[in-house]
Image (spheres, rainbow, N blue to C red):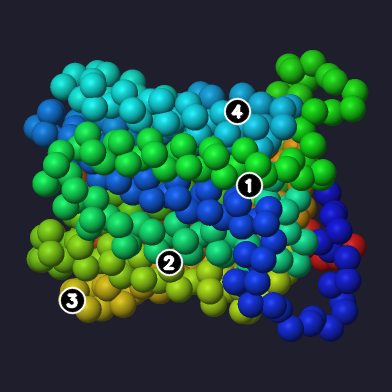
Amino acid sequence: MRSAAGAGRDAPPAEAPPPRSLLRDSGFRRLFAAQTVSRWGDTFNVVALAVLVFDRSGSGAGVAGVVAAEIAPVLVAGPIAGLLVDRFPRVRVMVAADLWRMALALTLPFVDHRLAAIYLVAVGLSLGAVTFNPASQAVLPGLVPPERLVAANSALWSAAVVSQIALAPLAGLLVAAVGAGAAFVVNAATFLVSAVLLWRLPEPRDTAAVPTTPRRWTEQLREGLVALTARPLLRVLAGVQLLAALSAGATSALLVVLADEALGGGARSFGVLLAAIGVGAAAGPALLSRLTRDPGKAWLIAGPYALRGAVDLVLAAARSLPVAAGALTVYGVGTSTGAVTFTSLLQSRTAAGERGRVFAGFDVLWQTGRLVSLGLGGLAADAFGIRAVYALGGALLLVAAAVGGARLGPLLRPEA
């Protein structure tokens, strides 16, 4: 499992080039531009879909149904999507996923009067994303050197978060002025732009997907399914991620309840809290890329979990909006730095030919924990109050930090 990323860790670290220098490389520049433009469309789509479904259904349950329609394909099709990513040229897989999603987004304005059709399109869009995302994560290590993975993932994450913060209000204005159909057309256009940008991206040599000795699909699928439990490093990472998902699913979804019941500000407080998370999430990767180039350090995985756990405990006791907003800014930093480090570590410690299945497997694990957490969190909030949900969520994250710190240290040593 050790890759070239582990080489030379004992050498004195050289000063890291600025993250923007990555854009001088045409391959990374194309991937960065494609994903960023696609994120712009995603922001318009999320806002328009939520507004449209709430208008058609007249209930929060209807909006929750869209979330379920987006998560279900990940659980069902994730392993198969990961296998596709490892078996076929990954750049072409991403282009195909973009064109698939473009076609579906263009159908939404014609079926937006039927709730069932909207759900079906949401499922189709999610199927495209569950294929595109692991392919993109698997391609990146072939575009940048190992010591730049943290900076590259930081740049991609920051662009996505900043896009969401900047464009969500604009998407709301567009939907209010013209209707949801215009936002869906914008989303389709961004998928087309992404596909055009990626079409000219050469397939990185280290991510050549077709094995030299082709094996049965079932054998490769089985290898992907057992990888998360058969290898010590992946097994520990899977365990801490599941604990984090069991916490974050409920605390993220029920933040609006905390804003209303515990802080007494309703929608206004909820908006402030979301903005605070966004500010922290945008700042986190920039701080991380200046702090380290090596994701193979236990504290970089365990630290963000501990930070987020402490914030949840603060939220469980918070009585004022400024305190909660300040804590959630820190939470955003922990979320983004943890995600970047986690992704970079998997990329550097996973063989090129299995990255698709590994990333898809972790996505399935995350979404499963998220669904369980949503169900149990709602029950706990009704039975014990919203503060109990955040106290429990904080405890789970602190356990994840403790397990990660204790178990990952030996596994991440250069000789491991």
Q: Amino acid at mark 2?
A: Ala
Say whether marks 1 and 2 touch (CB < 8 Å): no
Q: Residues within 10 Å of mark 4 (few under 14, many from 20)?
A: many
Q: Amino acid at mark 1?
A: Gln
Residue 372 horizontal/vertical position (percent): 40, 38
- Which of the marked residues, 1 or 2, is nearer the chain's N terminus? 1
- Which of the marked residues, 2 or 3, is nearer the chain's N terminus? 2
Distance from the alpha carbon under mark 1 to that under mark 4: 13 Å
Q: Amino acid at mark 4?
A: Ala
Distance from the alpha carbon under mark 4 to that under mark 2: 28 Å
Say whether marks 4 and 2 touch (CB < 8 Å): no
Q: Helix, strand or loop at disc 3?
A: loop
**Which residue is depicted at the point 30% across and 36% down?**
185
In the picture of the structure, the residue carrying the numbered disc 3 is 320
In the picture of the structure, the residue carrying the numbered disc 1 is 137
Query: Which label sits in the foreground, 2 or 3?
Result: 2
